[in-house]
Image (cartoon, rainbow, N blue to C red):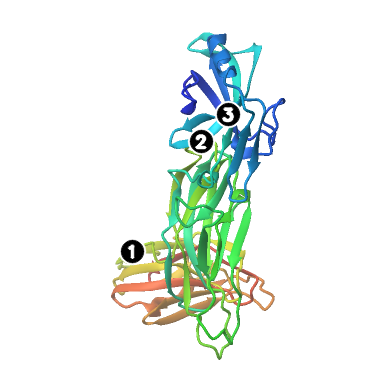
Amino acid sequence: MGTYLDWNLGGLVPSWIVDVKWGFGGASSSSGTSAGRADSTVTLHCCTYTRDEIETFKALMTPVFTNTNLLNGGTDLQVTPDGQILVITNGPYTWNGIISSVQFDEDEYATIDGDAAIEFDIIIELQRSTSQAIQPLPDCILFTNGFKRAVQFDGEGCDMGTLSFNWDGTGSVFLASTCSANPNSDNISCDNVLIISTPQGTITRQTGPYEYPFPPSDYPVWEGPDVDITSLLVAGNNTLMIQVVDSFILSTTASPGNLIGVSSLYVIQENGANANGISLVGFTQGSCGNKGPLSIDMSGGGSSAYPLVSLEVSNGFRQAVIVLGQRINLGVFHVNWDGNGKIYLASSATADPAHDLIWADDQVQAVNPLGVVEGGYHDASDNVITGPDIDVTSLFSKGSNTVTIWINDIYGTDIGCSSLWLIQVDS
């Protein structure tokens, strides 16, 4: 057993802290009064070999006090004339505070290195200044350093990636513009729709959608307060996905919308109990211009059984569209082709294009400087209909090639595709 966190109460350090809990339901002790913030109250669950340590902390108690919320986010701690306001620290954090109660039960014991020890609780109340009302963690997590560029088409969607992280379940978690941001005053922005998703749900921030004619100035950008994503999280491992979408749906006579982008985004924790309340597990970069193109050498040639070479484009997905006409970029693919056989978009690495079927909701589009090849598998009711593999050979020439694969929405309900592979087959 070891010290759980490094707390110092007026110069005294508990011998053993085995648990720390923030919040006490708004009341700091049975004999005290508190109008304070629940996250200003901390219970240190401790162990000791002797009653002397318990009595030492009891001697510092101030059971009668108030700790009132202030409009600026801090609190105002007031005590009786005989009360003792202590300097309380926990690692890099420092507060003025009091010990409101010390509680123990003679019948409750723990074990320290095989010896019996008395369990007891030290309940403390902290006065928070404006800056201490928000405690971003030193190990806050960068999701993106932001970007802004011209849109390539109306309704363009941009996958920023997927973040996996652990959360201890305490405090609140925000998307903020910096590690040291105060969510009470900090702003983030996007152009034009920010979509934040976990398996627990989705939060959207947006301007628009707007249709032609536009306002006379630059197209509106959403700018607003940091986003509280706590409701999307569970204590333990979490998976967070962020997308940015161009929200301008234009008539055929209008010019394209101009920009897409987002400010820097960090995951930070407010008023958490631990100094490592959020910790990075992993990050998968999305297809928003930051992930390098995938490459394959399609130089199989010969007359062996097909397919000769294959490259996975997508393992398949289907989701509700954000805006009518949304497009999702499945990636940019570099292909070195020997000029033999044909190249298809198929449902698997071993598909036979003569019999294989794929589906898309609503359209697969392969694009490069040589042209565009499309495959549409849908009907006017947005029902998915399977169709034959797509012959994209016309987009390739012998040697080095680059092709971009898109999924396009047409009817405005869902968007998605089956598994897609680029495969080379004998002619």
Q: Is residue 386 left or right of residue 308?
A: right
Q: Secondary structure at mark 1?
A: strand
Give the spatial CA distance, label 3 vs label 1. 66 Å
As measured in the structure, the alpha-carbon distance from the residue carrying label 1 to the one carrying label 2 is: 59 Å
* Marking on residue 95: 2
**Is 335 displayed left or right of 56 in the figure?**
left
**Residue kind at label 1, given as amino acid type:** Ile
Q: Position of residue 120 (x, y in %)?
A: 60, 18
Q: Which residue, given by chain and number where applicable, does mark 3 sit on?
A: 98
Element marked by disc 3: strand
Q: Nearer the viewer, residue 86 or 392?
A: 86
Q: Which residue is mark 1?
A: 296
Q: Residues within 10 Å of mark 3 (few under 14, many from 20)?
A: many
Residue type of the residue flagged with mark 2: Trp
- Disc 3 versus disc 1: nearer the observer: 3
* Residue 340 in view of the camera: no
What x and y, as percent, mark residue 194? 55, 64
Secondary structure under the numbered disc 2 in the rendered image: strand
